[in-house]
């Protein structure tokens, strides 16, 4: 669970865990970036067929679970949606993008740390 995002990142509920096999089955049909399935599409289909209101943040939590538990290998996600990389190169491209996003977040984190240090340094004067 993430601080200040508890509502979105709490552990999966039993009813959400029941969605994992359904989502993994559908994702397994989406091989290749050109076959990506959007989060809006996934959530709407879950709502329509299963009458369960799945939000995009909770879908991301399910996707996180699927990835870290290795339920699907080479599972990628872009602004176009989720898909399984069709080959190693496509997965490496996604992994590179993911690393770039992590580095960007680290830059913001490090800037925040410097701001705190600056504030502490000058508030004591």
Image (cartoon, rainbow, N blue to C red):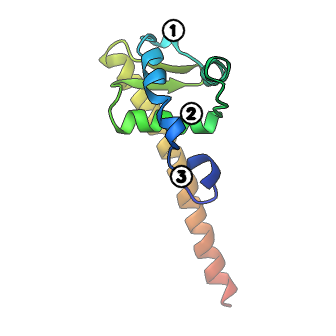
**Based on the displayed image, in which of its 4 quarters is residue 84 positioned?**
top left
User: In the image, what residue occupies the spot 54% across and 25% down?
Assistant: 78
Residue where numbered disc 3 is placed: 107
Element class at badge 3 = helix
Dot 3: few (<14), some (14–19), or many (≥20) neighbours within 10 Å?
few
Element class at badge 1 = helix
Q: Position of residue 22 (x, y in %)?
A: 47, 21
Mark 3 or 2: in front is 2
Q: Is residue 6 left or right of residue 99?
A: right
Q: Earlier in the sequence, mark 3 or mark 2?
A: 2
Residues at marks 3 and 2, CA–CA distance in whole angstroms: 27 Å
Q: Position of residue 119 (x, y in %)?
A: 66, 77
Q: 72 above or below 106? A: above
Which image quarter holds the C terminus? bottom right
Residue where numbered disc 2 is placed: 59
Q: Position of residue 62 (x, y in %)?
A: 49, 35
Residue where numbered disc 1 is placed: 34
CB within 8 Å, label 2 to label 1: no
Front one among 101 and 65: 65
CB within 8 Å, label 3 to label 2: no
């Amino acid at each position: 669970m993430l601080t200040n995002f508890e509502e979105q990142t709490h552990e999966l509920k039993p009813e959400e865990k029941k969605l994992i096999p359904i989502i993994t089955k559908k994702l397994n049909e989406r091989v290749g970036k050109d076959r990506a399935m959007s989060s809006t599409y996934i959530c709407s289909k879950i709502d329509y067929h299963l009458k369960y209101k799945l939000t995009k943040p909770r879908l991301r939590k399910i996707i996180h679970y699927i990835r870290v538990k290795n339920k699907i290998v080479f599972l990628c996600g872009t602004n176009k949606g989720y898909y399984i990389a069709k080959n190693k190169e496509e997965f490496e491209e996604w992994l590179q993008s993911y690393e770039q996003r992590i580095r960007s977040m680290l830059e913001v984190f490090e800037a925040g740390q410097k701001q705190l240090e600056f504030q502490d340094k000058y508030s004591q004067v």
